[in-house]
Every structure is written in structure tokens, then in C-alpha cells.
Image (tube, rainbow, N blue to C red):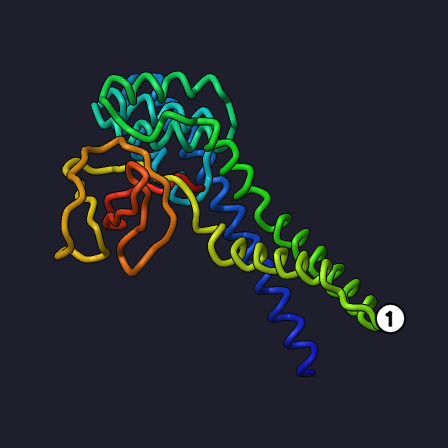
């Protein structure tokens, strides 16, 4: 009896989850069509509201991201425009958009767009982070097995031990640090870059929106970034991480 009830509850749960997902997908498709219609009618701010809601649900299309960038540029929000252009590039790797980003960066004297090829490498790294983790783990296990096999023969596994240590160190760094590395767009004017993760720390520089920085860590509400080759800290709410 209890087994039957348990099966019934599990089946009901998955049916409910499936129904909710289906309804959400239908709502998103309807909202996207509505947003596109508003965009075509040049009702840009109304369409942007719909697009932003869809994106918050972790749903998007490349064309939608370009439209959002176009609207934000028209509203003179260069930070937001560059943010959506960067998201579009992450999704598509379409190099034709790099020219537009560089044009906006040059027009507003923005830093961080000098080496766009690095973005593609970073995007590839994040997309295959799990695969790289598994590959490094398999290599580490193989090397450890090899070292033990050599030791059983009465020999000292010096070379294999050194290589194993290097691979394990790389795996440790990859798991604990690598996934935290990303790029972000300064999303607010008069953003303070600080020497430390505190509002009382010395100010490195005050920058406007649109600059692109590399995010290398986080401490509380502060993101650790690279600015002009130096480490700085910026409030989390003032930076838009280029991640989907």
C-alpha cells in the first residue's frame, strides 16, 4: 500500500513539474512574439521589458540579444549595450560583432576591448569546464596508477611523481579558481574601483559604464577584477558578468 502511494506521489510530482515547464515555455514563446511585435512597431522600451523578463528566465535567442543591445544603444546606455553584445558573442562566437564592440569602445574611450580573441578562449573554457575537469581527473588517476606500478617493481617513480604532482596542482587550480574567471561590463556611471574589498579602502579610479574587466575572484559583495594590469575591487551590483 505504501509503495503504491509513493509511486503515485512520484508520478504526480513529475507530471506537475512537466506541466509547469511546458506552461513556462509557452508563456516565453508568447512573450517573445509579443516583444518582437513591439520592436517592429518601434515601441522599443516596451519590447525591452519583455526581453529582459525572458532573459531572467534563462531563455534567449541570439536575435533577441542583438535587439536588446540596439535598444540600449538608442537609449544611450553604452554599458548595457556592450553587455548584450558580449552575451551575443558568447552565444554565437560571431566575430562580426567584434567590430561593433570596438567601435563603441573607441567612441566612448572604453578599456578592455583590445584583445577580443581572449573572449573566445574564455568562452570555450567555460563551455568545456566539466570536460576539462574529467580529463584532468582521468590523467591524474592514470599517472597515480603508473607511479604505484613503478614503485611495486622496486623503482622510484620520480618522473611520474613530478608529472602527477603538476597535473594534480593543475586540477586543483582548475576546480577552485578557473570557473571563477570571467569578464564583466561596468554597468553604472561613476563606479568606484577600490584597492581592497571595503568602502573605506583607497580609491584606484572612478570609471563610467561600459569598461570591460576580467573578474578573477569574489569576496562578500565585492568582485575582484583586473584593471590596467592591477588588482582592484568593485561592488557586485555595479558589474555585469558576461555569463548566461
- Image quarter where the N terminus lies is bottom right
Number of residue marks: 1
Please, what secondary structure does the residue beneath circle 1 have? loop
Residue appearing at x 32%, y 42% in the figure: 226
80 shown above or below 166: above
Nearer the observer, 244 or 168? 168
In the image, what residue occupies the spot 55% across and 37% down?
A: 124
Query: Vertically, is 93 above or below 154?
Result: above
Q: Position of residue 177 (x, y in %)?
A: 47, 54
- Residue 16: x %, y % from top left: 54, 59
Q: Indicate the quadrant containing the C terminus: top left, top right, bottom left or bottom right.
A: top left
Q: Residue at x 44, y 51 (%)?
A: 180
Side of 35 where 198 appears, left or right: left
Residue 144: image location, x then y, percent: 73, 64
- The structure residue drawn at horizontal position 42% and vertical position 43%, both measured from the top left corner, is 182
Tell me: residue 215, above or below residue 73. below
Residue most extreme to the right: 153
Q: How many neighbours does mark 1 have within 10 angstroms: few (below 14), some (14-19), or many (20 or more)?
A: few
Residue under pointer 1: 153
Quadrant in the picture for residue 71: top left
Lateral position of residue 26 relative to residue 148, left or right: left
Q: Residue 55: x, y in percent? A: 40, 39
Amino acid at each position: 500500500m505504501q509503495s503504491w502511494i509513493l509511486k503515485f506521489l512520484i508520478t504526480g510530482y513529475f507530471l506537475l513539474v512537466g506541466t509547469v515547464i511546458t506552461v513556462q515555455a509557452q508563456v516565453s514563446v508568447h512573450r517573445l512574439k509579443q516583444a518582437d511585435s513591439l520592436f517592429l512597431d518601434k515601441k522599443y522600451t516596451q519590447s525591452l521589458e519583455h526581453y529582459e523578463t525572458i532573459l531572467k528566465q534563462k531563455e534567449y535567442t541570439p536575435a533577441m540579444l542583438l535587439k536588446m543591445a540596439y535598444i540600449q544603444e538608442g537609449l544611450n546606455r553604452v554599458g548595457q549595450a556592450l553587455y548584450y553584445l558580449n552575451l551575443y558573442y558568447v552565444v554565437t562566437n560571431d566575430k562580426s560583432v567584434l567590430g561593433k564592440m570596438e567601435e563603441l569602445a573607441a567612441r566612448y574611450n572604453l578599456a578592455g576591448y583590445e584583445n577580443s580573441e581572449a573572449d573566445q578562449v574564455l568562452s570555450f573554457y567555460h563551455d568545456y569546464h566539466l570536460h576539462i575537469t574529467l580529463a584532468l581527473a582521468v590523467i591524474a588517476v592514470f599517472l597515480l596508477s603508473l607511479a604505484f606500478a613503478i614503485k611495486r617493481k622496486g623503482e622510484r617513480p620520480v618522473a611520474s611523481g613530478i608529472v602527477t604532482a603538476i597535473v594534480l596542482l593543475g586540477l586543483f587550480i582548475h576546480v577552485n579558481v578557473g570557473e571563477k574567471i570571467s569578464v564583466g561590463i561596468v554597468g553604472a556611471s561613476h563606479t568606484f574601483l577600490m584597492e581592497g574589498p571595503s568602502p573605506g579602502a583607497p580609491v584606484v579610479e572612478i570609471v563610467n559604464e561600459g569598461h570591460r574587466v576580467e573578474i578573477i575572484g569574489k569576496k562578500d559583495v565585492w568582485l575582484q577584477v583586473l584593471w590596467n594590469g592591477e588588482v582592484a575591487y568593485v561592488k557586485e551590483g555595479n558589474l555585469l558578468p558576461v555569463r548566461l
